[in-house]
Image: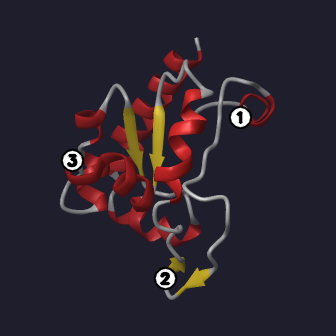
Amino acid sequence: MGVTRETFYGSDKIAVMPLDFYYPGKGKSGDLPPRKDFAGKWHPTLLKMMPNIQLTLLVGQYAMRVYLGKQRQKNLTMTVQNYADYLPTYFPLVHPSPLNYGWQNRNPWFQTQVVPELQKRVAQALK
């Protein structure tokens, strides 16, 4: 994101809102999915409390499914690669988990094209 630790954790400019407030546990290839309908039930109420959102980062396939629905691409890679299709409201991203380091290595365009644009958009939103 290109922000300091202090800005991320210690400011009132960045909010982190998970799809669920309960950790579902580990699955075969990562965490289990969040509970169905939790985000649909609670996110609208929470978002009303944050009326000045400038940019929403959709981190991972579950967030993309909830917020982009049928507008997302055939798979996560294509959705992230076509991030500009969802701007200025949403910025879809791969989850920054160690489980996704292989994905990042197979998709070098992420670091060279997507990350700089993400940093630019975050800087603009924080102004």
Residue drawn 37% across the image and 29% down it: 89
Looking at the rendered image, the quarter that the C terminus falls into is top right
Q: Where does label 1 land, which residue? A: 8
Residue 82 position, x and y percent, is 23, 43
- Give whichever of 19, 88 is nearer the camera: 19
Q: Say whether residue 87 is visible.
A: yes
Judge by depth and name the residue closer to the eye, 39 or 95: 39
Q: Which amino acid lies under the numbered mark 3 shown in the image of this protein?
A: Gln
Q: Quadrant of residue 14?
A: top right
Residue under label 2, please give it: 29
Q: Residues within 10 Å of mark 1 (few under 14, many from 20)?
A: some
Q: Residue at x 46, y 24 (%)?
A: 120
Q: Is residue 82 above or below residue 69?
A: above
Amino acid under disc 2: Ser
Q: Is residue 116 left or right of residue 22?
A: left
Q: Note whether 112 is above or below 47 in the view shown.
A: below
Left or right, 55 with reference to 73: right
Q: Earlier in the sequence, mark 1 or mark 3?
A: 1
Q: Quadrant of residue 26?
A: bottom right
Query: Residue lying furthest bottom in this view?
Result: 28
Residue 71, disc: 3
C-beta proximity under 8 Å, tags 1 and 3:
no
Location of residue 53 in the rendering, given as x and y in whole percent from the top left corner: 52, 24
- Name the quadrant of the N terminus: top right
> Disc 1 versus disc 2: distance between alpha carbons?
28 Å
Left or right: where does residue 22 sit relative to residue 62?
Answer: right
Dot 2 lies on which element?
Answer: loop
Q: Secondary structure at mark 3?
A: helix
87 or 43, which is in the foreground?
Answer: 43
